[in-house]
């Protein structure tokens, strides 16, 4: 009879049980089996049936309301079986059976409310993820003369979405990339990230000078944030083998060249977007095979036992092999292993490799960039 009732309880749900429901139902059925064994060993008189009220309550913490109702029905049948076998059925036994039925109704109601909240939270998380994916379009594998790969790492699978952003586009002025980090998290951060990227995707095609691009982005941010909100960003341009970087309060990109790792610090610090940054470009001449890592501050802040992840020390060994996508995969694996899977912040990563000038194509290099490169 017990196996028949258990089968009936499982059929109350729709489709297979989730791992959480299986755990809840399994624990509840295990409790019923334990109480039944104790009751059977104690003799024909009923003493412990009241403990079966715990079974549906235990299942309610994990399982769906249908599974909870099935567990309660099972407990009621098992308890009734012991009550019928008792030659001198007591009032307390009848009250215990009523208590099992009442506990089942309450537990199923609680499970239904919890299940509805879980579904709602899951839907909100899914919509937020869709919103973020719409903002961060896939990059690469080739943009102009650059092989490009990007990666977005969240602290956990259910982490609150953040405002890290990146983009790479091939413009009349060369390949232009941006990486940035919006202060704060959640949908407000995603909204501001979408504003920055929307502005960038427009002005990157229109402004020949990266400083003008930064000025336009700063105005876009200032129009849409509060007094304490801002966006750190680094804007990068590759034009005719010349790499130009303007940095607005963002971690300096790392240049990987022939086994060396070179932080490309700006000539002078500048505040983030939203605080009217006045930027000075950092200019480098690229060699075929050079790689550039752009990242947000979640990478620089990743640590275990107070020790930060040694990004610069390990960058070449992790990022200098295979494709750029292989390099980012190695970096993510090493990073997650370093922090034992416990990241405190979202991380955006972009890795590019300069493959050499385009054959038969001459790209004009502005005189101010050439002068900076020679200096």
Image: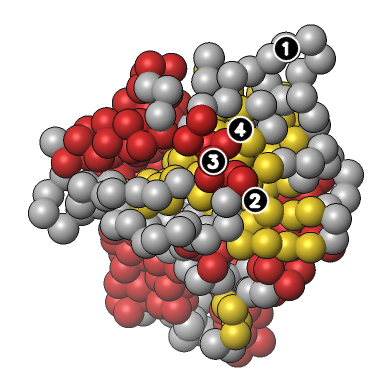
Q: Whole-Å distance between the Cαs marked 2 and 4?
A: 14 Å
First in sequence: mark 2 vs mark 4: 4
First in sequence: mark 3 vs mark 4: 4
Nearer to us of marks 3 and 4 is: 3
Give me the disc on residue 371.
3
Residue 32 seen in the figure: no
> Do the residues under discs 3 and 4 have CB atoms within 8 angstroms?
no
> Do the residues under discs 3 and 1 have CB atoms within 8 angstroms?
no
Would you name the residue on which mark 2 appears?
293
Label 2: state its secondary structure.
Answer: strand
Left or right of 63 in this view: 352 = right
- Residue toward you, 319 or 54: 319
Q: Whole-Å distance between the Cαs marked 1 and 4?
A: 14 Å
Residue 372 seen in the figure: yes
In the rendering, at what x and y percent does residue 36 appear? Answer: 60, 75
Nearer to us of marks 3 and 1 is: 3
Q: Whole-Å distance between the Cαs marked 3 and 2?
A: 25 Å
Nearer to us of marks 2 and 1 is: 1
Would you name the residue on which mark 1 appears?
361
First in sequence: mark 3 vs mark 1: 1
Left or right of 303 in this view: 146 = right
- Residue toward you, 316 or 56: 316
Q: At x 64% / y 74%, what residue is drawn?
A: 309
In the rendering, at what x and y percent does residue 358 appear? Answer: 76, 18
Structural crowding at the residue carrying mark 1, measured as other residues with C-alpha within 10 Å and reported as few (<14), some (14–19) or many (≥20): few
In the image, residue 302 above or below residue 76: below
């Amino acid at each position: 009879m017990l196996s028949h009732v258990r089968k009936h309880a499982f059929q109350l749900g729709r489709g297979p049980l989730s791992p959480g429901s299986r755990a809840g139902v399994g624990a509840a059925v295990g409790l019923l089996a334990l109480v039944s064994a104790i009751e059977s060993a104690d003799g024909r008189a009923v003493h412990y049936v009241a403990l079966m009220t715990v079974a549906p309550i235990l299942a309610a913490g994990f399982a769906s309301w249908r599974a909870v109702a099935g567990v309660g029905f099972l407990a009621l049948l098992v308890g009734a079986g012991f009550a019928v076998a008792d030659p001198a059925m007591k009032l307390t036994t009848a009250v215990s059976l009523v208590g099992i039925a009442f506990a089942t109704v309450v537990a199923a109601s609680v499970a239904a409310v919890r299940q509805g909240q879980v579904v709602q939270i899951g839907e909100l998380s899914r919509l937020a993820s869709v919103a973020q994916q719409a903002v961060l379009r896939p990059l690469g594998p080739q943009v102009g003369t650059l092989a490009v790969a990007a990666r977005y790492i969240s602290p956990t699978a259910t982490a609150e979405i953040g405002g890290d952003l990146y983009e790479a586009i091939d413009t009349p002025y060369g390949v232009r990339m941006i990486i940035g980090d919006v202060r704060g998290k959640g949908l407000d951060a995603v909204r501001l990230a979408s504003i920055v990227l929307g502005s960038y995707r427009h002005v990157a095609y229109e402004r020949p000078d990266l400083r003008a691009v930064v000025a336009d982005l700063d105005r876009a941010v200032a129009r849409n944030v509060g007094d304490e909100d801002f966006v750190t960003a680094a804007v990068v341009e590759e034009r005719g083998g010349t790499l130009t970087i303007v940095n607005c309060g963002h971690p300096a990109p790392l240049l990987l060249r022939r086994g060396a790792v070179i932080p490309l610090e700006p000539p002078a610090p500048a505040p983030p977007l939203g605080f009217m940054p006045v930027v000075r470009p950092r200019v480098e001449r690229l060699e075929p095979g050079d790689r550039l890592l752009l990242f947000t501050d979640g990478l620089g802040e990743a640590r275990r036992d107070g020790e930060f992840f040694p990004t610069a020390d390990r960058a070449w060994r992790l990022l200098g092999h295979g494709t750029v996508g292989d390099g980012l995969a190695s970096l993510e694996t090493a990073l997650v292993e370093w922090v034992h899977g416990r990241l405190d912040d979202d991380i955006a990563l972009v890795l590019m490799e300069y493959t050499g000038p385009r054959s038969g194509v001459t790209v004009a290099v502005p005189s101010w960039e050439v002068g900076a490169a020679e200096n």
